[in-house]
Amino acid sequence: MLSVKLICVGRMREKFYIEAFNEYLKRLQPYCKLQLVEPTEQKLGDSPSQKELEKALDREAEDILTAIPSDSYVIALCIEGRELSSEALAELVAKVEGSGRPRMCFIIGGSYGLSPKVKARADLKLSMSPMTFPHHLARVMLSEQLYRSFKINEGSRYHK
């Protein structure tokens, strides 16, 4: 069974996001071993300088990079990444699962995104859309797309 690690900066506080995410965690249990890691999001003022922002992202990057198992296929979610259809993501999940690499690791940054160090570690930079979403909503969307990927790969009617 494929191990999937979600590294998502910051804790969710909104009940509706937590409930939606937990529903997909439950649905994913038969398909993969899922682990969630929530590195602390660095606190910044309302208008941080570029230097303050870089320093905060570098601190988050240390926690993120430490949490990535060395044998993982790493996907960093970032706006400049490649967009994939649900079918293409399902193909990628199946390919990684069959490749002998035992883990996939998805990374979602905090409010200010991801450090270039984290993006450089990624095997794939993935964008959900050219639109901007709250990072906690991105976590819910990713978990739904992972569930959809497994359902596509099993030939289920979930994906129409």
Image (tube, rainbow, N blue to C red):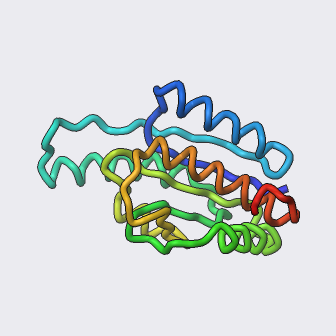
Q: Is residue 82 above or below residue 115?
A: below
Q: Is residue 26 above or below residue 52?
A: above
At a point 47% along the width and 27% down the height, the residue shown is 14
Left or right, 149 with respect to 73, comes to right
Q: Quadrant of the N terminus?
A: bottom right
Left or right, 98 with respect to 81, comes to right
Left or right, 76 with respect to 150, comes to left
Q: Is residue 120 above or below residue 33?
A: below
Q: Quadrant of the C terminus?
A: bottom right
Left or right, 7 with respect to 155, comes to left
Q: Which residue in the rendered view is the most extreme toward the front?
A: 160
Residue in the foreground of this view, choosing between 102 and 107 = 107
Q: Position of residue 55 (x, y in %)?
A: 24, 49
Report how many numbered discs are placed on residues in the image: 0
At a point 35% along the width and 54% down the height, the residue shown is 113
Residue in the foreground of this view, choosing between 35 and 158 = 158
Q: Position of residue 43 (x, y in %)?
A: 27, 35
At a point 39% along the width and 66% down the height, the residue shown is 130
At a point 16% along the width and 37% down the height, the residue shown is 46
Residue in the foreground of this view, choosing between 12 and 117 = 12
Q: Position of residue 70 (x, y in %)?
A: 63, 61
Q: Position of residue 78 (x, y in %)?
A: 42, 62
